Image (cartoon, rainbow, N blue to C red):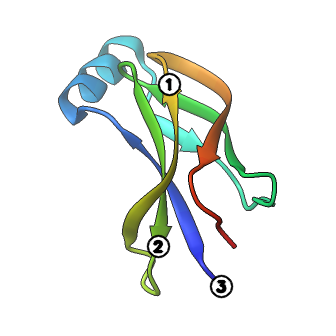
Amino acid sequence: MKTFIIATALSLTAVSAFAAGHEMKPMVDGMDQDVSGGTVTASKVVAGENGWLVVHRTDAEMKPGPVVGHAPIKMGENMDVAAILTEEVA
């Protein structure tokens, strides 16, 4: 079975500055889900700047591998962010 992880692609400096100034910590909230529809959804993403929610395929040690999906995110709170998968994921 292939697995995947969700990550955000953002500048750590900008994220830290945003979090300190606004008392919001950068985060991605997601759960196990059915990917047969070709998307992966994060229920909430908090970001310090505009960026991307990125879905990676993982190896046996859960280390991130190739990108298999992505979705744009805006600075602040983003709800129900759906990343479209660019290849089939089990």
The residue to which callout 1 is attached is: 73
Which mark sits nearer the N-terminus, 2 or 1?
A: 2
Pick whichever, 23 or 5, lies toward us. Answer: 5
**Residue type, numbered disc 2:** Thr
Residue 51 position in % (x across, y down):
39, 27
Local packing at callout 1 (Cα closer than 10 Å; few below 14, some 14-19, many 20+) is many
The residue to which callout 3 is attached is: 1
**Residue type, numbered disc 1:** Ile
Residue at 30% in and 20% down: 20
The secondary element bearing badge 3 is classed as loop
Local packing at callout 2 (Cα closer than 10 Å; few below 14, some 14-19, many 20+) is some
Residue at 39% in and 19% down: 50
The secondary element bearing badge 1 is classed as strand
Question: Whole-Å distance between the Cαs marked 2 and 1?
Answer: 22 Å
The residue to which callout 2 is attached is: 58
Q: Which mark is residue 43?
A: none
Residue 9 position in % (x across, y down):
35, 39
Residue 11 vertical placement versus 88 (above, below): above
Q: Quadrant of the N terminus?
A: bottom right
Local packing at callout 3 (Cα closer than 10 Å; few below 14, some 14-19, many 20+) is few
Q: In which quarter of the image is the C terminus?
A: bottom right
- Left or right of 25 on screen, residue 4: right
Question: Whole-Å distance between the Cαs marked 3 and 1?
Answer: 29 Å
Which mark sits nearer the N-terminus, 3 or 1?
A: 3
Give yes or no for contact between labels 2 and 1 (Cβ–Cβ under 8 Å): no
The secondary element bearing badge 2 is classed as strand
